[in-house]
Amino acid sequence: MEKIQCEILGLSSSPSTGGAYAILLKEYEGNRRLPIIIGAFEAQAIALEIEGIKPPRPLTHDLLKQLTDNLGASVIEVIVDELRENTFYAKVILEASGLVQEIDARPSDAIALAVRAESPIYVANSVMEAAAFVPSDEDESIEISSVNPEAENSSKPMTKEAKLAVLQNKLREAIESEEYERAAKIRDDIKKLTIDN
């Protein structure tokens, strides 16, 4: 599987996402960006670690990191390796006692663990080709609101990345509730937004 190393460009939220956040990954050697919808808890866990803020008690991802360390394992990398029915899948690659293990995980949990373990984040090329976009020149100058999801500013217009993330979330909801006509319209909106980029 061909994979591309990515970095976290930012976290974004909008009132229209219903409390969900989007994490935006950017490939190291290229311009493509991949938005992934994640929950508020995972967004907070990622933001706290990136900003170096230690909560008074360990969060779930801190516990996972302590467990792997205490068991003599290390997180080699995480990879967002699949996109099925508008849902991203990831794997955490662990090494313990010379054995390498792949553990299925949600991308948000895998990324939160990777940030704590200072491990590289990869995305399968097939996933990048299916869901990533290249921002237009005007988007290059727009920063994602903040890495800290608490520092939301709803007076700012939504970036194209955030709009794309919202549309992908709506598409997933439409498919899950079997509203295929609505899903087709949303899919067309996503294609139009990515072509405009």
Image: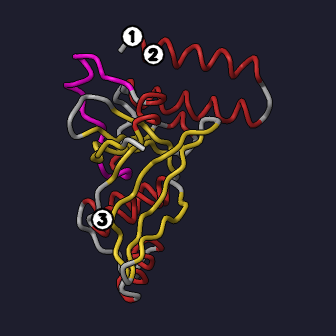
On screen, residue 71 above or below 161: below
Instruction: Find the magenta span and give its range.
Output: 133-150
Sequence-wise first label, 2 or 3: 3
Rendered residue at 37%/89% (across/down): 70
The answer to whether marks 2 and 1 mark residues whose Cβ atoms lie closer than 8 Å is yes
Q: Amino acid at mark 1?
A: Asp
Q: Is residue 145 left or right of residue 123?
A: left
Q: CA distance from mark 3 to mark 1?
A: 34 Å
Query: Which secondary structure is most common in the magenta stretch?
Result: loop
In which quadrant is the N terminus drawn?
Answer: top left
On screen, residue 187 above or below 106: above
Which residue does the numbered mark 2 point to in the structure image?
Answer: 193
In which quadrant is the C terminus drawn?
Answer: top left
- How crowded pointer 3 is (Cα within 10 Å; few <14, some 14-19, many 20+) is rated as some
Residue 132 in percent (x, y) is at 41, 30
Q: Amino acid at mark 3?
A: Glu
Which residue does the numbered mark 3 point to in the structure image?
Answer: 49
Which residue does the numbered mark 1 point to in the structure image?
Answer: 196
Circle on res. 83: none
Residue 145 in percent (x, y) is at 30, 39
Q: Quadrant of residue 112?
A: bottom left
Q: CA distance from mark 2 to mark 3?
A: 32 Å
SS label for mark 2: helix
Task: Single out the residue that lies furthest toward the right.
Answer: 178
Rendered residue at 41%/88% (across/down): 71
